[in-house]
Image (spheres, grey):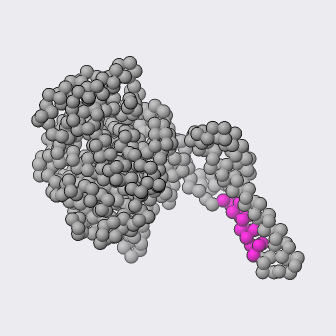
Amino acid sequence: MHRDGVQEQAGRDCRLRRLLVRWLFPVIGLFSVVWFLIRVIPKPSRAAYPCQRVAFPLASSFVLWLLGLAGSTLLFRRAREHFTRERLLAGLLCLGLGVGLVWLLVNPAEQPASANPPVPNRPLGVARGVQPGRVVWIHDPNATDWDGYGSPEPWYDDAHTDPVVVQSMVSRAIRGLAGEGTDKEAWDKLFRYFNQTRGKGEVGFTPGEKIAIKINNTLCYNASTTTFEKQRDNRNRIDNSPQMIAALLGQLVNVVGAAQQDISIGDPGRIMPGCIYDRVHPEFPDVQYLSSTGGHGRTASEFSDVPFYWSTKAAAGTKQDFLPRSFAEADYFINFAILKSHDQGGITLCGKNLYGALIRNPDATLGNKRYNYYVMHTSLPKTTPGTGKYRAIVDLMGHSQLGGKTLLCIVDGLFAGRNWSSDPVEWRVPPFSGDWPSSIFVSQDPVAIDSVCDDFLWIEWSDLPHMSGADDYLTEAAMADKPPSGTVYDPDGDGVRLASLGVHEHWNDPLHKQYSRNLGTGKGIELTCPVKADFDGDSAVRCRDLASLCGRWLERSEASSADLSGPRGDGLVNLRDFAVFARYWTRDLLSPSLSSEDPP
């Protein structure tokens, strides 16, 4: 991400930070405590305000600092008493503990460096997609209804993640991305654009072509390889939702016309857990469900002979990487990520999801010397903070058989995690306001979709997404032909440098969520939020949307169920859909605006 003024001045900055911590921290901490108490005690809901979310960590740290100061003082007094009574061992113990506390007070643990605030509406790179730079965001609170940790059932139960609503969300997202009135027309437009950009001509999907889908099953790292069940303590930690996986497969099979046996889906280095397989397999029994271990209907991941090269000298002498066979043989690739932050990467979205696109023992990925693979995590911002650095994610996004074959990027945001291993966490900022995110994001621009989701993560959480360099990979990817790091990104090893992989930009503000194409000021990102009656995805309900609904009504006896969804999202088209449409149409006639909010 482009951050003005972020420079590498490590020595001077470090000394300045320590000076501020030692001398200004007590003053700022006391002020934060007073401010938090004055504002929140009269009205507890103010605790969710952005200013209080900043004040609370400072206030709580100050209170802990005071407790530490009091504790060290008490320990020094006890040490003196023990020495006076010639209790040498007890005195030395108290003295040592006291000195340790003082050391912690004046030398606090080093925190990850924070990034400067994003610079709004300054696009970098070249927008991609049939609608260049377009990212579609669908938010429907009706998709999720889970009580959280007290619930006896997991969040991925159909009782808590509504499959009908999710199907409607996926349908609306695809139509909105292509700007077409039906699912079939939308998919055909996406395939034709993509094939044209790859030199195959303006042709749509051809039966017999293969589609590979990379999901994120990272929370299956300790799952059973015999029962294919996640460990109990990982039960509610979020991987992709089975309902959204089923909705996507339904689109590919029932609308696009792909044969089930030509679709592979999974996370090659992880197992395919029962919570997904048992829910999806009965409806799509012939799909290949990729898993690190085969058996019980799963397809074991295998190496192909397609090599992968890292564009960094640090990879010299390491073991050669190869792509999974299912990914290398696919004609199209779908990058299906989750909305989460990350303790080493700051954020983990479509870019970071590709870390699992290579077959490796998990220990090898994390740097176990026995395997001698290049350790991708060393290029993440926790280890390499700042901007203008080599980022392994860019190589993954640019390889011809991964990013180069990516027809579609999807971020499953029905539930979101505050870290890679997190349980679902409710979101506080509007329009979520204490509820689950209940969202899906789609785009044909892999940089744009991560940029938008990064903006959401940045405003929701003030810790990991603010890590310095958390989205430096987006700047590097957008400017891959001439990146700030000076890296010559060439993951295919053919001597051809990558071109721009997409457009990177930040919105104008968290309320309006507008990018340069929304504002008409540049050729960056366009964020659209089509509502249920917006069939062509132009963020407005107009006469041609009515024409589309009438067409569905007239053709309902012939259309497939996947194309039949009206505004109500129940898979049927009837008079009730026209009543719902009228509410949207009236609203937009009176007050047209870009909004993710649906009328009651």
| Residue 272 percent location from the top left of the image | 29, 62
Whether residue 241 can be seen here: no
State the image coordinates of residue 130 (x, y, percent, origin top left): 26, 37
Q: Is residue 22 left or right of residue 567?
A: right
Total of numbered circles in the picture? 0
How far across and how far down the image is residue 373, in percent?
36, 69
Q: Main secondary structure of the magenta part?
A: helix
Image quadrant where one finds the N terminus: top left
Q: Is residue 149 above or below residue 124?
A: below
Q: Position of residue 358 (x, y in %)?
A: 31, 62
Residue at the far top: name it.
590
Query: Residue placed at 21% from the left, 65% from the top?
Result: 297
Which residue: 27% across, 37% down?
569
Residue range corresponding to the magenta coloring = 93-108
The answer to whether one can see residue 438 in this image is yes
| Residue at the limit of the structure toward the front, as seen here | 152
Q: In the image, 334: left or right of 600? A: left
Magenta-span inclusion, residue 106:
yes
| The C terminus - image quarter | top left
The foreground one among 375 and 125 is 375
Query: Does the magenta run of residues contain 40?
Result: no
Residue 448: name its quadrant: top left
In the picture, measured across the screen, residue 410 lies left or right of residue 452, that is: left
Quarter of the image where one finds residue 566: top left
Q: Is 9 above or below relative to 365?
A: above
Name which residue lies at 77% across and 60% down.
70
Q: Eyeballing the image, is 307 above or below 7?
A: below
Q: Residue at x 60, y 44 (%)?
A: 54
Q: Residue furthest right?
A: 84
The residue lying toward the viewer, choosing from 15 and 23, is 23
